[in-house]
Image: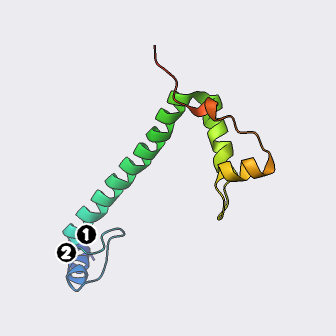
Amino acid sequence: MTSHQQREELDRRAKEGETVVPGGTGGKSLEAQEHLAEAFLILYIKLVIWRSRGGQTRKEQIGTEGYQEMGRKGGLSTNDKSGGERAAGEGIPIHENKFKTRQRG
């Protein structure tokens, strides 16, 4: 079967409602599914970059020590108590002044 024949077969199956391209769910043709999958991949990459950059920006604002202290507080949280509540209840010191935004200048 040639490449052209394979594409025609995949297009026929897509028109019958089958997802023939991973990430192309909902596309009514092979080409539509390819476009959906490409768009999904681009959005996923942008999300990963955005999330990574957001954390980096926060770390730059409060410094490494503050970022670690904030993570320590978050790591103490449970289903029924926030990290701050648990730290207070167990006498664990959390230095919140370390994760206040630093003044520029």
List the residue tagged with mark 1: 33
Give the residue drawn at x 55%, y 29%. Answer: 62
Q: Quadrant of residue 79?
A: bottom right
> How many numbered marks appear?
2
Q: Are marks 2 and 1 in contact (CB under 8 Å)?
A: yes
Q: Secondary structure at mark 1?
A: helix
Q: Is residue 27 above or below residue 85?
A: below
The residue positioned farthest toward the right in the image shown: 91
Give the residue drawn at x 80%, y 50%. Answer: 90
Q: Quadrant of residue 21?
A: bottom left
Q: Quadrant of residue 23?
A: bottom left
Q: Is residue 97 above or below residue 35?
A: above
In the image, is 88 to the left or to the right of 58? Answer: right
> Quarter holding the N terminus?
bottom left
Q: Secondary structure at mark 2?
A: loop
List the residue tagged with mark 2: 29
Query: Which amino acid, by three-letter code, is at mark 1?
Result: Gln
**Residue 104: % across, % down:** 46, 18
**Residue 59: % across, % down:** 54, 33
Query: Which amino acid, by three-letter code, is at mark 2?
Result: Ser
